[in-house]
């Protein structure tokens, strides 16, 4: 059975996305208190999920071939 959201983001990139998302989102509570902090939700969610919708649309993956699901 095929996964709904196959992983297409490298584990190192996932960690970077989570850290960047947390840093951007922290500006909601600390700092200038602007709505731009909500932009951090995108990298945070894609980092946690391990799936980037834009990568899926363009058929791109930063995962190694051994960890990536086979195409059918």
Image (cartoon, rainbow, N blue to C red):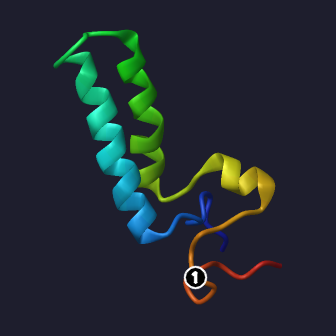
In the picture shown, does residue 46 fall above or below 26? below
| Quadrant in the picture for the C terminus | bottom right
- The number of numbered discs placed on residues in the rendered structure image is 1
In the orientation shown, which residue stands out farthest toward the right? 72
Residue at (26, 17) in percent of width and height: 28
Q: How crowded is mark 1: few (under 14 residues within 10 Å), some or many (20 or more)?
A: few
Position of 47 compared to 63: left or right? left
Q: Residue at x 71, y 56 (%)?
A: 56
Q: Name the residue under label 1.
A: 64
Residue 2 appears left or right of 34? right
Residue 16 vs residue 33: left or right? Answer: right
Snapshot quadrant of residue 62: bottom right
- Which of 4/47 is in front? 47
Image quadrant assignment for residue 41? top left
Closer to us: 40 or 7: 40
- Which residue occupies 30% across, 28% down? 25
71 vs 60: above or below: below
- Residue 18 in the image, given as x and y percentages of width and height: 34, 49
The image shows residue 10 at horizontal and vertical percentages of 49, 69
20 vs 11: above or below: above
Identity of the residue furthest to the bottom in this view = 66
Q: The N terminus appears in which quarter of the rendering? A: bottom right
Dot 1 lies on which element?
loop
Is 57 left, or right, of 30 in this rendering? right
Percent position of residue 60, x then y = 72, 63
Q: Which residue is drawn at 79% across and 55% down?
A: 58
Residue found farthest to the left: 30
């Amino acid at each position: 059975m095929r996964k709904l959201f196959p992983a297409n983001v490298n584990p190192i990139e996932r960690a970077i996305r989570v850290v960047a998302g947390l840093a951007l989102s922290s500006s909601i509570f600390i700092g200038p208190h602007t709505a731009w902090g909500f932009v951090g939700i995108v990298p945070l969610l894609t980092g946690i999920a391990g799936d980037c919708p834009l990568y899926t649309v363009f058929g791109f993956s930063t995962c190694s071939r051994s960890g990536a699901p086979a195409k059918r």
